Image: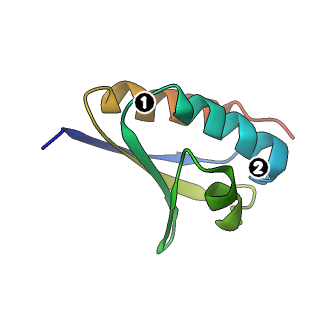
Amino acid sequence: MPPSSETTATLPPDVDLHARPAARFVRTALGFRSTIAVAVGDREADAKSLLSVLALGAKAGTTLRLRADGDDGPVAVEALGRCLAGLTD
């Protein structure tokens, strides 16, 4: 069973996770071999699927849970956390 890594990240106060920011997030996720999930509350999405990420409807200031299962999981969740923190509208 591959190792799992998990963290939380908060969207900047002025950025919703709509098309452009979500696409940047998904592009970052696609750079890793791990299976990556992003969750808001009880809703979870495949972080490598733009439509799934958009369906979360994450608004500015929302805390997201990031989980990566795979050898590069720790690096993936760290990179995705930085990506979310650096998003601009």
Report the front residue among 1 and 43. Answer: 1
Q: Nearer the viewer, mark 1 or mark 2?
A: 1
Residue 22 screen position, x and y as percent: 72, 45
Report the front residue among 16 and 72. Answer: 72
Q: Is residue 59 left or right of residue 49?
A: right
Q: Which residue is drawn at 68% across and 66% down?
A: 55
Q: Residue at x 64, y 56 (%)?
A: 53
Quadrant in the rendering for residue 28? top right
Q: Is residue 86 left or right of residue 80?
A: right
Q: Using the numbered discs, state the Cα–Cα distance from disc 1 to disc 2 in whole angstroms.
A: 23 Å
Residue where numbered disc 1 is placed: 76
Dot 2 alpha-carbon crowd within 10 angstroms: few under 14, some 14 to 19, many 20 or more: few
Residue 44 screen position, x and y as percent: 49, 65
Is disc 2 placed on a helix, strand or loop? loop
Position of the N terminus by quadrant: top left
For residue 85, above or below residue 51: above
Indicate which disc residue 13 carries. Answer: 2
Residue type pointed to by label 1: Ala
Report the front residue among 22 and 15. Answer: 22
Q: Residue at x 42, y 45 (%)?
A: 36
For residue 32, above or below residue 7: above
